[in-house]
Structures are given as C-alpha cells and as structure tokens.
Image (tube, grey):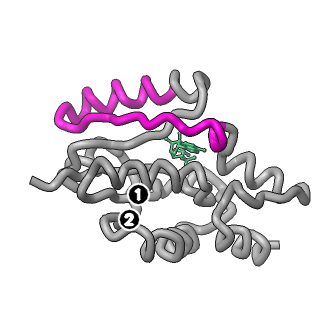
Amino acid sequence: MKRRAIYPGSFDPLTNGHLDIIERACHLFDEVTVAILVNPNKAPMFTVEERIEILHEVLDAKFAQVNIDTFSGLLAEYAMKKRAQAVVRGIRAISDYEYELQMALMNRRLAPSVETIFLMAPQEYSFISSRLVKEVFKLGGSVEGFVPPFVIERMKNKI
Ligand code: ADP
C-alpha cells in the first residue's frame, strides 16, 4: 500500500523552512501532496495560481513523489478524499504547538483514520515564516537564504 501524506498550508510564499519539511516528508512517505489552502478571507502576496506555479518550478525537478494541489473547506475531508494516511505539519516553536495541537485533535475527531505528523524545524529555519519574509522584503531587507532564489525573483516582480 502506498503511504500518502498531505502537507497543507498557505505557502505565500514558499520558504526554505517549507522546503525542508517537504524533503523530510519525502523520506517518510511514497507520495506527498503539497496542498494550498484557498482562503478567500486572506489578502495574499501571491495568487493561488502564482503559488502553484512557484511550487511546480521549485519542486518538480527535485522531488518525483511530490504533487501539488489546492483545497478549500475542511482539511480532514480533503485528506480522506485523497486517501492520505497522514497530514504533515511543521513546528517551529512552542507558539506553533498550541494551535497545531488544537487542529490535530479536531482533525482526529473529524477523520480518525488520518494521523497528524509533526516535524520539528531545524534551528536555522525555526524563525522563518512566510509572514516575516514578506514583511522584511517589503521593508527592503534581504530575504536571501530564507526562500528559494526563484521566489526572490517573483517577489521582486511584485513591486
Ligand atoms: P499556515 O498559514 O497554515 O501556517 P504556512 O504555509 O505558513 O501555512 O505553513 C504550513 C506549515 O508549514 C505549518 O505547519 C507551519 O508550521 C509549517 N512551517 C512554516 N514555516 C516553517 C519553517 N520555517 N520551518 C518548519 N515548518 C514551517
């Protein structure tokens, strides 16, 4: 049986922290779906289409078992529909833990067959978030080393 995992998130934009989680998830699962949550309430830097394009550009050549998708609504339902055994999430600090625990317990209630797997961020990426990367970039700071070079190019095109 194929072991499938979903790695859900906003990926606005994809960071090296996300990439690290994706690479490690590939060691654990036969198939990893990076799933962009379509959230109409958020004002993103990149449209969903742009984020899909970035993910393909950065991931396709590197990871044969990764596929890219979008979803809206309940993650638990999406994971069951995809017949995934697991949802992968990254934990950077204690501040992530509280929210992630709540989500994992709710998702277990909604989809008991789907396990949530947490991967700890390595120290060098533990302070990186899409939000902070966008903030630093907008204020003129360098985001080199925090996101893939292709993402930097796309961010530059935005302004
Ligand atoms: P969300 O908006 O759902 O937090 P993100 O795209 O920011 O979506 O993050 C998706 C997942 O990746 C979350 O589990 C988050 O904790 C994790 N993550 C984000 N940045 C990092 C990082 N630097 N290192 C490890 N995990 C991370």
Residue receiving disc 2: 69
Residue at the limit of the structure toward the left, as seen here: 1
For the residue pair 13 and 77, the one nearer the viewer reads as 13
For the residue pair 42 and 53, the one nearer the viewer reads as 53
Q: Are marks 1 and 2 in contact (CB under 8 Å)?
A: yes
Q: Residues within 10 Å of mark 1 (few under 14, many from 20)?
A: many
Q: Residues within 10 Å of mark 2 (few under 14, many from 20)?
A: few
Q: What's the residue at 35%, 45% (across, down)?
A: 75
Helix, strand or loop under label 2:
strand
Q: In the image, is residue 113 part of the stretch drawn in magenta?
A: yes
Q: What's the residue at 33%, 43% (across, down)?
A: 87
Q: Is residue 61 above or below residue 72?
A: below
Image coordinates of residue 53 in percent, x first then y, are: 52, 76
Magenta stretch in the rendered image: 99-126
Label placed on residue 35: 1
Can you tell which quarter of the image residue 143 is in?
A: bottom right
Which quarter of the rendered image does ligand 1 occupy?
A: top right
Q: Which one is earlier in the sequence, the residue at label 1 or at label 2?
A: 1
Q: What's the residue at 63%, 36% (across, down)?
A: 123
Q: Amino acid at mark 1?
A: Ala
Can you tell which quarter of the image residue 85 is in?
A: top left
